[in-house]
Image: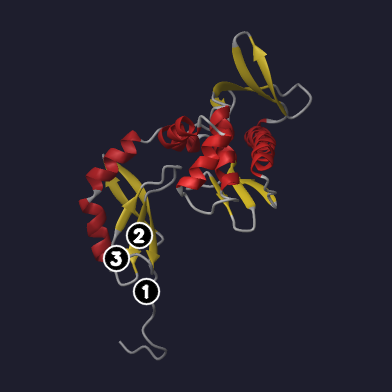
């Protein structure tokens, strides 16, 4: 067939569906110039598995790669915790303690903590349509308040002055520090025990003195936060589970 303007370019799909245990599983497809081989990963923060194809790779080979790795993917999917939505009756951790979401549409306000018996509740007023957003906004505000206070303590100890503090929903890093002194944190750290949040703040502030992970850097961290090693271990073993909420 003659194509006067050249052969039409093949449009590569942004996902494929593979059968695992009798169910169709959507796998996102990403082509990367930096990748040197095919790769399949399951994000700890939830969402679809991701198939990475190197720039010179072929779709047929990529699909064969997924087919060969279906047992691995099935095992990982089976172990991944189910997501917990911000809904009435759901339990979410706050500062390491479970809190039950309680929708109270007849009350004034937005969201607040209330002890009812021996159970901590995260009470949310307003319409059901706004419940999830109000829970998220409340947790983000609490995270920012705690992180700003912790950063101020550690910055005073190390005689540094952060330029800005940003709180967002990062997927792969709990915190970061630029050479200009801009700090960023995942708001989900408010779900962890307080000592873990304090460690994270100390960690990023210490980078304002040492932009590396040298022995001198860790001395700064451990001096500011004596429980740093235990908090770091908690984050390594339990941090991924915080991404399943909301």
Q: For the point 33% across and 90% down, which residue is it?
A: 2
Determine the secondary structure under disc 2: strand
Mark 3 or 1, nearer chain start: 1
Res 23 seen here: yes
Q: For the point 33% across and 34% down, which residue is it?
A: 79
* Residue 233 occupies quadrant: top left
Separation of residues labelled 3 and 2 (CA atoms)? 10 Å
Separation of residues labelled 2 and 1 (CA atoms)? 18 Å
Q: For the point 23% across and 50% down, which residue is it?
A: 69
Image coordinates of residue 151 in percent, x first then y, are 65, 40
Q: How many marks?
A: 3
Marks 2 and 3: in contact by CB < 8 Å?
Answer: no
* Horizontal side of residue 234 vs 41, given as left or right: right
Q: Which residue position is annotated with label 3? A: 59
Residue 52 is labelled as 2
* Residue 154 occupies quadrant: top right
Looking at the image, is 145 positioned above or below residue 40?
A: above
Looking at the image, is 50 positioned above or below residue 90?
A: below
Mark 2 or 1, nearer chain start: 1
**Are there few (<14), some (14-19), or many (20+) residues within 10 Å of tag 3?**
some
Quarter the N terminus occupies: bottom left
Nearer the observer: mark 3 or 2; the answer is: 2
Nearer the observer: mark 2 or 1; the answer is: 2
Q: Which residue position is annotated with label 1? A: 10
Quarter the C terminus occupies: top right
Determine the secondary structure under disc 1: loop
Q: For the point 33% across and 39% down, which residue is it?
A: 77
* Residue 199 occupies quadrant: top right
């Amino acid at each position: 067939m003659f194509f006067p303007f050249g052969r039409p370019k093949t449009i590569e799909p942004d996902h494929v569906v593979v059968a695992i245990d009798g169910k169709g599983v959507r796998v996102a497809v990403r082509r990367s110039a930096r990748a040197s081989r095919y790769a399949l990963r399951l994000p700890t923060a939830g969402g679809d598995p991701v198939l990475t194809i190197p720039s010179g790779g072929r779709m047929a080979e990529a699909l064969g790669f997924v087919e060969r790795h279906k047992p691995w993917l099935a095992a990982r999917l089976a172990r991944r915790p189910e997501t917990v939505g911000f809904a009435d009756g759901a339990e979410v951790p706050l500062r390491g303690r479970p809190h039950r979401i309680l929708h109270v549409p007849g009350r004034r306000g937005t969201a607040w903590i209330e002890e009812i018996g021996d159970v901590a509740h995260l009470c949310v007023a307003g319409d059901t349509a706004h419940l999830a957003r109000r829970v998220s906004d409340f947790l983000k505000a609490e995270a920012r308040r705690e992180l700003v206070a912790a950063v101020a303590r550690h910055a005073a100890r190390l005689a540094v002055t952060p330029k800005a503090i940003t709180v967002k929903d990062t997927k792969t890093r709990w915190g970061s520090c630029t050479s200009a002194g801009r700090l960023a944190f995942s708001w989900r750290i408010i779900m962890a025990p307080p000592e873990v949040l304090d460690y994270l703040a100390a960690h990023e502030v210490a980078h304002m003195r040492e932009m590396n992970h040298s022995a001198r850097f860790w001395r700064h961290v451990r001096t500011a936060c004596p429980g740093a090693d235990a908090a770091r271990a908690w984050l390594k073993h339990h941090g991924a589970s915080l991404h399943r909420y909301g």
